[in-house]
């Protein structure tokens, strides 16, 4: 397992270095074609890795990996909403958005690893924590549903206000860097504040997603592989969906159902152990319906149903 983990991390490092050092060495606006290309590249790599797991470790490992990957990918779309709000609020130019997301992804990889290790340790020492995870997911799903349609403006966000009060900030973003020296004094640019906020937001998202992962696998390696594969494609997915955010109105309904469903599955696992194919199939169907219905209700010429 350790050899596989090292090999996996080397591939990830190579792909990230290729992404930043070659394809995005110079800041530029990511075109829709480029975003689609990278989205398919990352999905292709994820599928290929799943196929490799199937042939080397069997169908159980591959199924667990596919289940966790889909859950993480679906929840990752919710991150896109946050990215869109943050970039709009800080007026981050398109050509610098990839840079912010790239470094944000590195932080996300680290924190996911920490949460997975912590989760495994808790479950191994305190089995009842599994039910706590389930209850937490039910609560999170319900709160997500209750907050649908509420104002998501960042104008009064306490985290941003706190950062702005305590850090020396310049609004000069022309250099495309996270910091800037003015008269010998170090200032932080809006790029840095946006990065910190995105990082903190991902930590919140990671708590939900990692907890949900344990409903489908107890193998920390599989959970880690699936999480990282889903995260790596998040940057390109953002640029694909950035102009379609308003058309995913009912996606949050589907995601809230998914969290409640997974949480209930964990809580009631001793009463009825649902086959993994049935559970995953239900989630896939719900997310697919929520996306298709969103596009149907928000198509040109129709009014959004609330």
Image: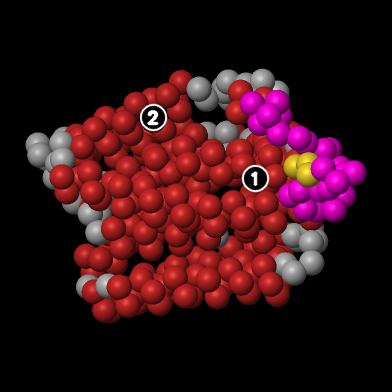
> Which residue sits at x=87%, y=49%?
174
Q: Secondary structure at mark 1?
A: helix
Q: Residues within 10 Å of mark 2 (few under 14, many from 20)?
A: some
Image coordinates for residue 112, horizontal then vertical, percent: 42, 51
Residue 167 in the figure: left or right of residue 229: right
Position of residue 152 relative to residue 23, above or below, is above
Image coordinates for residue 41, horizontal then vertical, percent: 56, 70
Q: Secondary structure at mark 2?
A: helix
**Residue furthest out toward the right:** 183
Residue topped by disc 1? 195
Image coordinates for residue 25, horizontal then vertical, percent: 75, 69
Position of residue 18 relative to residue 34, above or below, is below
Q: Indicate the quadrant where residue 84 lies.
A: top right
Foreground of the two, 17 or 248: 17
Position of residue 43 relative to residue 88, above or below, is below
Foreground of the two, 194 or 89: 194
State how far apart marks 2 and 1 are (Cα): 24 Å
Residue 40 in the figure: left or right of residue 225: right
Position of residue 278 relative to residue 225, above or below, is above
Residue topped by disc 2? 140
Q: How is the image coloured?
A: secondary structure
Visible residue check, residue 289:
no
**Residues in magenta, as a range:** 162-185
Image coordinates for residue 298, horizontal then vertical, percent: 64, 35
| Mark closer to the observer (2, 1) | 1
Which mark sits nearer the N-terminus, 2 or 1?
2
**Residue furthest out toward the left:** 271
> Which residue sits at x=54%, y=39%?
200
> Which residue sits at x=62%, y=55%?
103
> Which residue sits at x=53%, y=52%?
107
């Amino acid at each position: 397992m350790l050899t596989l983990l090292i090999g996996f991390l080397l591939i990830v490092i190579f792909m990230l270095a290729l992404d930043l050092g070659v394809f995005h060495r110079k800041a530029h606006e990511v075109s829709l074609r480029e975003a689609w290309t990278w989205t398919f590249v990352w999905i292709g790599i994820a599928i290929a890795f799943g196929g490799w797991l199937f042939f080397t470790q069997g169908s159980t490992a591959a199924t667990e990996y596919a289940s966790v990957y889909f859950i993480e990918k679906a929840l990752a779309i919710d991150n896109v909403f946050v990215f869109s709000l943050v970039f709009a609020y800080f007026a981050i130019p398109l050509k610098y958005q990839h840079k912010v997301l790239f470094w944000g992804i590195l932080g996300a990889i680290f924190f996911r690893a920490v949460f997975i290790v912590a989760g495994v340790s808790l479950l191994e020492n305190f089995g009842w924590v599994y039910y706590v995870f389930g209850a937490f997911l039910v609560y999170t799903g319900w709160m997500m549903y209750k907050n649908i349609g509420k104002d998501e403006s960042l104008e009064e966000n306490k985290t941003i206000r706190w950062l702005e009060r305590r850090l020396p900030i310049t609004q000069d973003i022309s250099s495309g860097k996270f910091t800037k020296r003015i008269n010998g004094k170090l200032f932080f640019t809006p790029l840095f504040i946006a990065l910190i906020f995105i990082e903190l937001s991902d930590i919140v998202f990671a708590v939900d997603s990692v907890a949900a992962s344990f409903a489908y696998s107890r193998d920390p390696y599989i959970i880690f592989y699936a999480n990282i594969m889903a995260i790596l494609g998040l940057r390109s997915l953002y640029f694909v969906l950035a102009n379609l955010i308003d058309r995913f109105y009912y996606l949050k309904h589907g995601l809230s159902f998914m969290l409640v469903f997974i949480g209930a599955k964990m809580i009631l696992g001793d009463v009825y152990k649902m086959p993994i194919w049935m559970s995953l199939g239900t989630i896939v169907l719900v997310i697919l319906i929520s996306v298709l219905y969103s596009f149907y209700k928000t198509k040109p010429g129709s009014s959004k149903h609330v």
